Image (spheres, rainbow, N blue to C red):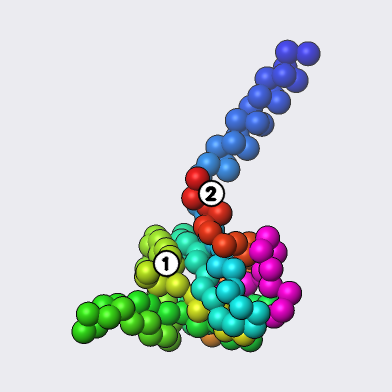
Amino acid sequence: MRPLRTIAVLLLTLMCAACSETPEQGIKVNNGWIRLPVAEGKMTAGYITISNFSEAPVSITRVSSAAFERIEIHTMSMQDGMMRMRPVDSLTLAAGERIELSPNGLHLMLHGANPDVTEGQLVPLTLFDGEQPLAELRVPVAAENPHVQ
């Protein structure tokens, strides 16, 4: 019985070592949420954190969802004493870089919400580099950031 136990412990140790040495690849998206639209069919904002675990830069050229007519990546900046929003063509993350899309900074501008976009709903989002999907996720619709405690 002892040799069988030794072999089992050895196998588990090897499996755990293999898991810990395997780096994540590609991008990871988390902490996502979409602000509840103030009026049906109007625009709103979305927020996500994107991490690039690959060894090369990754570009996000567009974001899509069946729940919205159009999604743009926007930046905010102060110009002439006023906060201004501008669309950006793409986001490029260097290898190992993490970008947070948040209120008052980079964010997703979601236009033409479907009437069924309601608080608590999980909305599917797909991030693309050109026509290549990079990540698919589902983010909650909420009046306030559900990730802040």
Which mark, residue 103? 1
Q: Which residues are magenta?
A: 114-129
Q: Is 1 or 74 nearer to us in this picture?
A: 74
- The residue wearing badge 2 is 22
Q: Residue at x 53, y 41 (%)?
A: 20
Question: Tag 2's secondary structure?
Answer: loop
Q: Within the image, what quadrant is residue 131 found in?
A: bottom right
Q: Is residue 28 left or right of residue 125?
A: left
Residue 129, relative to residue 149: is it above or below?
Answer: below
The residue lying at 55 percent from left, 67 percent from top is: 35
Q: Locate the N terminus by quadrant.
A: top right
- Residue 27 in sight from this viewpoint: no
Q: Position of residue 126 (x, y in %)?
A: 61, 74
Secondary structure state at the residue bearing disc 1: loop
Q: Amino acid at mark 2?
A: Thr
The residue under the point 42% across, 79% down is: 74
Determine the residue positioned at 65% across, 31% down.
12
Residue located farthest toward the left when viewing the structure as drawn: 80
Visible residue check, residue 71: yes
The picture places residue 82, in percent across and down from the top left corner, at 27, 80
Residue 132's spot in the image, x, y percent? 59, 80
Residue 90 vertical placement versus 22 (above, below): below
Q: Residue furthest right?
A: 1
Q: Is residue 104 magenta?
A: no
Which of discs 2 and 1 lies nearer the camera? The answer is 1
Q: Please provide percent x and percent y for residue 140.
A: 63, 62
Do the numbered discs 2 and 1 sit on residues whose CB atoms are within 8 Å?
A: no
**What kind of residue is marked 1?**
Pro
Inter-mark Cα distance, 2 to 1: 34 Å
